[in-house]
Amino acid sequence: MPKMKTKKTFAKRVKVTGTGKLRKYSNYVSHFATNKTHKQLKHLHKPSLLDKSDYKRDRDLLQG
């Protein structure tokens, strides 16, 4: 059986924390930024954790 390969496009968008959780950055930070408030942009720049319901599928994308 061939080896599993890491999905590189997904690996570039997600980082694994020290406790094994997946951290991602928000989309649409600079797209139409003039229409967004300063508060919206400030919150979009912060990383967030992926939802636990997506962990099984997303960990399989990183195996390799």
Image (tube, rainbow, N blue to C red):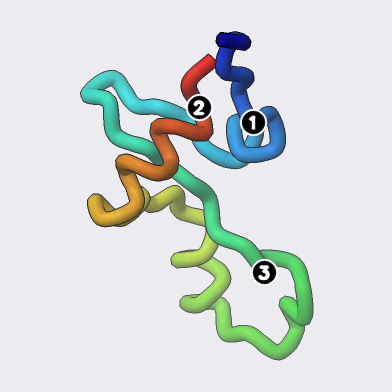
Q: Are marks 2 and 3 in contact (CB under 8 Å)?
A: no
Q: Horizontal placement of 27 versus 42: left or right?
A: right
Quadrant of residue 21 within the rendered picture: top left
Give the residue at the far front of this rendering: 1
Q: Position of residue 5 (x, y in %)?
A: 62, 19
Q: How many marks?
A: 3
Q: Horizontal placement of 48 versus 64: left or right?
A: left
Q: Horizontal placement of 9 versus 56: left or right?
A: right
| Disc nearer the start of the sequence (2/1) | 1
Circle 2 sits on which residue? 62
Circle 1 sits on which residue? 7
Task: Name the residue nearer the viewer: 3 or 9.
Answer: 3
Q: Distance from label 1 to label 3 (Cα)?
A: 22 Å
Q: Distance from label 2 to label 1 (Cα)?
A: 6 Å
Q: Are marks 2 and 1 in contact (CB under 8 Å)?
A: yes
Task: Name the residue nearer the viewer: 16 or 43.
Answer: 16
Q: Position of residue 9 (x, y in %)?
A: 70, 37
| Disc nearer the start of the sequence (2/3) | 3
- Residue positioned 50% across, 27% down in the render: 62
For mark 3, give the secondary structure. loop
Q: Amino acid at mark 1?
A: Lys
Give the residue at the far bottom of this rendering: 35
**Nearer mark to the viewer, of 2 and 3:** 2
Quadrant of residue 1 within the rendered picture: top right
- Above or below, comparing residue 46 to residue 29 in the picture: above
Circle 3 sits on which residue? 28
Q: Are marks 1 and 3 in contact (CB under 8 Å)?
A: no
